[in-house]
Amino acid sequence: MRQHHFKIDAIVILPDPIHALWTLPETDADFSTRWRLIKSYFSRQCHSQYQGKISTSRQHKGEKAIWQRRFWEHQVRDGRQGRAYGDRDFVNHLEYIHYNPVHHGLVNAPKDWQYSSFHRYVEEGIYDQMWGASERLIFDSDIGME
């Protein structure tokens, strides 16, 4: 990972998917390699009880059964540089990521899901700890479907 620098702006790890919002270097937009490295590292570190049933195809390729083989990507339309949280597309995806554990019925509030960058945003004063706890958030139908 040291060769493929990037910044994780937001992340949430759920039982099925992982959602992330990254800032890549201007000269290196190779997100495929980064996803491969993240999935590989996580799979090696993950306790065997979470690895599920491994198909014959995956066994032949030395793969674990944690992640989907594919991924979906979306380039933030605002052309954001740094942490300009006012950009609408960036904010929409940031909130979608942090609200996802609530959306999937895993917790009642984003603060209750420990595998999320939400807590970092609370510490930085960007979110109130109770954000997303008392109201149901609705996102545009295209958010998170990329």
Image (spheres, grey):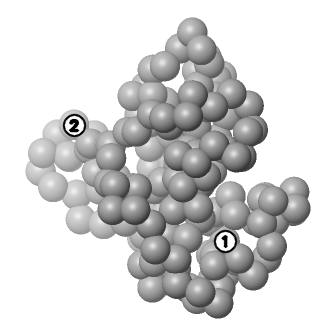
Task: Using the image, tell me which numbered label, if any, was put on residue 61.
Answer: 2
Q: Residue at x 52, y 84 (%)?
A: 136
Classify residue 96 as left or right of residue 69.
Answer: right
Q: Where is residue 103 in the image (x, y as percent from the top left)?
A: 45, 77
Classify residue 131 as left or right of residue 71.
Answer: right
Classify residue 123 as left or right of residue 113.
Answer: right
Residue at which label 1 appears: 114
- The mark lying in front, picked from 2 and 1, is 1
Q: Is residue 104 above or below residue 19?
A: below
Q: How packed is label 2: few (under 14 Cα within 10 Å), some, or many (20 or more)? A: few
Q: How packed is label 1: few (under 14 Cα within 10 Å), some, or many (20 or more)? A: few
Q: Which of marks 2 and 1 is nearer the N terminus?
A: 2
Res. 60 visible in picture = yes
Q: Where is residue 25 in the image (x, y as percent from the top left)?
A: 62, 18
In this view, the residue in front, 80 or 8, is: 80
Q: Residue at x 61, y 52 (%)?
A: 91
In this view, the residue in front, 74 or 118, is: 74
Res. 44 visible in picture = no
Q: Residue at x 75, y 81 (%)?
A: 130
Q: Where is residue 112 in the image (x, y as percent from the top left)?
A: 66, 81
In this view, the residue in front, 84 or 2, is: 84
Residue at far left of view: 56
Image quadrant where residue 70 sits: top left
Q: Position of residue 63 (x, y in %)?
A: 29, 44
Image quadrant where residue 122 sits: bottom right
Q: Which residue is drawn at 45% across and 28% down?
A: 31
Q: In this view, does 53 lie above or below 102?
A: above
Label 1: element kind: loop
Task: Give the CA distance from mark 2 to mark 1.
Answer: 32 Å
Task: Using the image, tell me which numbered label, if any, was put on residue 95.
Answer: none
Label 2: element kind: helix
Please name the amino acid that badge 1 sits on.
Gln
